[in-house]
């Protein structure tokens, strides 16, 4: 029957939901053209999408995110290394200055300075989507992926101008949605 199958899918989907008010230890995933649920990871203080670290990176790690309130734009979103590559707890940042196209990163007052115009607050979950509440109150989702010289690895970018394009610095770019939902993996069981 179709109804039991739909109920089973609903149970699977709801089991991975993030509590909207107190979220901790969750992973962010990118979705876009040719990017189907790749994880966001840390490499030398910057955000990447994929599974292979960029060449030359000295500190790389899969990460989990946490925030005290995923519905409040005054909360910071902190990251923790899943393999102890770093012991600090840096905060997610973007540079929302008009007409900028900058890589998303992670800031720690212990070992880095925040880039000019960068912010570590303003992030909220809108459903399953990571969004940014701008100073004028508008909700924005201006995340982009920029290809790198490693196949399947992308820089996670913030495009404050919102203008489209096909390339930046000679590499393909594409808009992406950042979500707290992992891609659905269907089992190999034969239908009955």
Image (cartoon, rainbow, N blue to C red):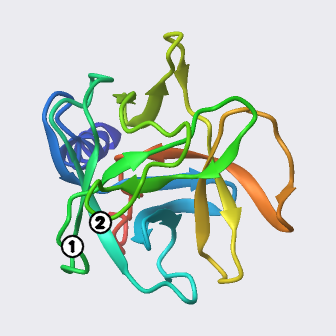
In percent of width and height, residue 181 lies at 35, 48
Examine the image and state in which quarter residue 108 appears.
bottom left
The residue that appears at 67% across and 82% down in the rendered structure is: 151
> Seen in the image, is 81 located left or right of residue 155?
left
Q: Which residue corresponds to mark 2?
A: 63
Q: Residue at x 55, y 42 (%)?
A: 116
Q: Are marks 2 and 1 in contact (CB under 8 Å)?
A: yes
Residue placed furthest toward the top: 136
Q: Is residue 125 above or below residue 6?
A: above
Q: Which mark is residue 82?
A: 1
On the picture, is 108 further left or further right than 15? Answer: right
Q: Residues within 10 Å of mark 1 (few under 14, many from 20)?
A: few
Measure how far apart labels 2 and 1 are at the Cα level: 5 Å
Q: Earlier in the sequence, mark 2 or mark 1?
A: 2
Callout 2: 10 Å neighbours few (<14), some, many (20+)? many
Q: Percent position (x, y) of residue 188? A: 36, 75
Q: Nearer the viewer, residue 165 or 38?
A: 165
Along the line of sight, the residue nearer the viewer: 60 or 90: 90
């Amino acid at each position: 029957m179709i109804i039991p199958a739909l109920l089973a899918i609903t149970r699977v989907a709801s089991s991975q939901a993030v509590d909207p008010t107190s979220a901790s230890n969750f992973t962010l995933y990118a979705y876009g053209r040719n990017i189907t649920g790749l994880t966001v990871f840390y490499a030398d203080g910057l955000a990447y999408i994929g599974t292979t670290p960029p060449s030359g990176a000295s500190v790389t790690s899969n990460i989990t995110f946490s925030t005290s309130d995923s519905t409040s734009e005054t909360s910071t979103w902190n990251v923790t290394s899943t393999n102890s590559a770093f012991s600090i707890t840096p905060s997610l940042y973007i540079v929302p200055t008009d007409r900028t196209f900058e890589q998303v990163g992670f800031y720690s007052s212990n070992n880095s300075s925040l880039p000019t115009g960068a912010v570590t607050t303003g992030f909220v979950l809108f459903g399953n989507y990571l969004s940014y509440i701008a100073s004028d109150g508008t909700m924005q989702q201006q995340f982009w992926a920029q290809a790198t010289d490693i196949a399947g690895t992308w820089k996670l970018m913030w495009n404050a101008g919102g203008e489209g394009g096909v390339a930046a610095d000679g590499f393909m770019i594409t808009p992406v949605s950042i979500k707290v939902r992992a891609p659905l993996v269907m089992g190999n069981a034969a239908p009955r």
